[in-house]
């Protein structure tokens, strides 16, 4: 019985494959001519409310549906006008590498194969980038949300030993307490919940005028908890906060962690890769003292989604936290079951994709120097946006610009509602796509310049659109 899912006619598939490749290259080459985003008509959504297909369908036809109903209605983060949240733009290089990875269909849980060596190469490069010692190690995960979670689990092992895996938290008298900034990403809280430590065991420390965690309050909180018989175990600092791009005073956090025998984790989701830029790297000084760092290649690194990474100063702790023997996973000195330790011993995933390949292609292709200048370039554009806001009496800056995130608003009565409407109007116009946040109780238009394709003219388009919609939305009603 011929049961394969391979094509009956490879020549036809090859031609179709080339059309698909050309379509995506056209998309990326001409992306500037498209709207950043457009609202999805009901008619388009309805195409994805059909019953499970029972019969075969021609690949060309499915591809056409993708071109008509999916591609035009993506979020638009590949577009240079996309400035919402913190989204990377991707690259054609990353796209092509992803195709190679899918063709190989490598499973990076383990085994004696070069794809695993590629992931180890990335871990070694990251150890080098962050000046970590030889025994450092790490692995790819979906994103920083997961990387932060893994780091909390590793910190828990460091505090209680690997017996916690057998006994659970209830087997220990200690009540573990963690500390982070009020401006930290919500996934830090989620990590505490998922680790079974509970949200109540996370102290949210107020920030200073530059949105950095206040060291005096942190120290007070640690002392207070210790005096109450609790066990401070983890400081989670932020390098590049999601709201405003603030970077905590990492050397001071490292000092406090060392004094109190606590784990220092840095959430550097997008900010950590500023280390590629010699000009920006000093802003992250102290990060080399961290016990673990979580970051994403899919944000400032421009690697196509998803590509999060957790780097741990002493990789043995990853093994102590996650290794589980199983008869069907026996590892050997030789043969295909060699090559220990396997990535599945360093984290919770057994089957894992080849995220390392698109990352390896990206770093090999552009090199650290060009990655650094691209990242510094986005910060220069943020500084330009800041200068345009300061030069416009109708606009107001709402937070200092530490890196590449600019929070501002249109000055007017009822500013929260109007600025919310301005952001929706800009998004629906397709001219640009900022998002919003709340800064000291005020709604802010938030532009995070992450995309390597963004230029000065895109910043001008955002400012001009803000002014235009701001004026229109505040016109006296007649
Ligand atoms: C984006 C972000 C996260 C979450 O990362 P994901 O890759 O989306 O899971 C965490 N922390 C900060 C500071 C971020 O910017």
Image: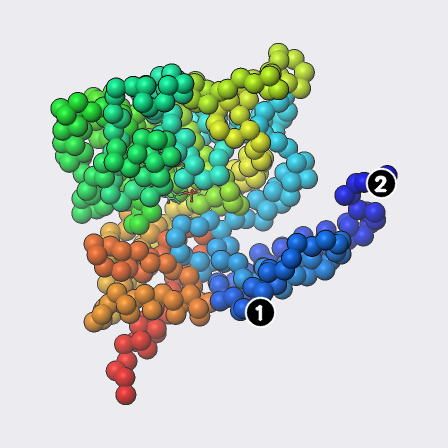
The image shows residue 456 at horizontal and vertical percentages of 40, 60
* Residue 125 in view: no
The image shows residue 326 at horizontal and vertical percentages of 56, 18
Which label sits on residue 2? 2
Task: From the viewer's side, name the closer residue of 59 and 86.
Answer: 59
**How far apart are labels 2 and 1 at the CA level?**
39 Å
Q: Residues within 10 Å of mark 2 (few under 14, many from 20)?
A: few
Q: Which residue is mark 1?
A: 43
Q: Give the residue displayed 62% in from the left and 20% down from the top.
A: 328
Quadrant of the snapshot with the C terminus:
bottom left
* Contact (Cβ within 8 Å) of mark 2 with mark 1: no
Q: Residues within 10 Å of mark 1 (few under 14, many from 20)?
A: few
Q: Which quadrant does ligand 1 occupy?
A: top left
Look at the numbered disc 2 and give the secondary structure of its residue.
Answer: loop
State which quadrant residue 55 falls in: bottom right
The image shows residue 154 at horizontal and vertical percentages of 38, 25
Q: Earlier in the sequence, mark 2 or mark 1?
A: 2
Q: Give the residue displayed 31% in from the left and 72% down from the top.
A: 470
Quadrant of the snapshot with the N terminus:
top right
The number of discs equals 2
The image shows residue 285 at horizontal and vertical percentages of 30, 33
């Amino acid at each position: 019985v011929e049961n394969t899912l391979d094509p009956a006619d490879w020549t036809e598939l090859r031609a179709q494959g080339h059309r698909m490749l050309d379509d995506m290259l056209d998309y990326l080459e001409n992306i500037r001519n498209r709207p950043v985003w457009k609202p999805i008509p009901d008619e388009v959504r309805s195409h994805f409310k059909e019953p499970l297909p029972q019969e075969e369908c021609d690949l060309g036809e499915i591809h056409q549906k993708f071109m008509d109903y999916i591609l035009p209605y993506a979020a638009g983060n590949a577009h240079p006008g996309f400035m919402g949240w913190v989204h990377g733009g991707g690259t054609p290089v990353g796209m092509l590498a992803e195709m190679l990875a899918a063709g190989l269909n490598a499973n990076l849980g383990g085994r004696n194969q070069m794809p695993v060596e590629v992931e180890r190469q990335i871990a070694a490069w990251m150890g080098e980038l962050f000046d970590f010692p030889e025994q450092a190690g790490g692995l790819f995960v979906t994103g920083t949300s997961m990387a932060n979670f893994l780091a909390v689990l590793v910190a828990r092992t460091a505090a209680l030993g690997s017996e916690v895996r057998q006994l659970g938290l209830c087997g220990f008298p200690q009540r573990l307490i963690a500390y982070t900034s009020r401006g930290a990403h919500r996934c830090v809280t989620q990590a505490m919940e998922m680790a079974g430590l509970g949200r109540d065991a996370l102290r949210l420390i107020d920030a200073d005028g530059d949105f950095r965690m206040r060291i005096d309050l942190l120290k007070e909180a640690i002392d207070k908890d210790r005096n109450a018989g609790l066990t401070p175990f983890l400081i989670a600092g932020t390098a590049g906060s999601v709201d405003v791009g603030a970077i905590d005073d990492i050397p001071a956090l490292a000092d406090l962690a060392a004094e109190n025998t606590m784990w220092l984790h840095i959430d550097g989701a997008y900010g950590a890769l500023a280390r590629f830029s010699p000009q920006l790297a000093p802003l992250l000084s102290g990060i080399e003292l961290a016990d673990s760092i979580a970051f994403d290649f899919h944000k400032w690194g421009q690697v196509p989604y998803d590509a999060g990474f957790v780097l741990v100063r002493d990789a043995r702790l990853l093994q102590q936290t996650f290794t589980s023997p199983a008869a069907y996973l026996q590892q050997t000195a030789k043969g295909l079951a060699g090559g220990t330790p396997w990535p599945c011993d360093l984290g919770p995933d057994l089957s894992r994709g080849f995220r390392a390949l698109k990352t390896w292609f990206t770093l090999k292709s552009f090199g650290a120097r060009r990655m650094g200048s691209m990242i510094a370039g986005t910060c220069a554009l943020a500084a330009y946006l800041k200068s345009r806001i300061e030069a416009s009496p109708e606009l107001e800056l709402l937070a200092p610009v530490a890196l590449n995130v600019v929070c501002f608003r249109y000055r007017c009565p009822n500013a929260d509602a109007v600025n919310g409407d301005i952001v929706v109007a800009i998004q629906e116009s397709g001219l640009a796509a900022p998002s919003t946040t709340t800064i000291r109780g005020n709604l802010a238009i938030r532009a995070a310049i992450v995309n390597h394709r963004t230029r000065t003219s895109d910043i001008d388009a955002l400012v001009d659109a803000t002014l235009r919609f701001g004026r229109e939305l505040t016109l006296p009603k007649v």
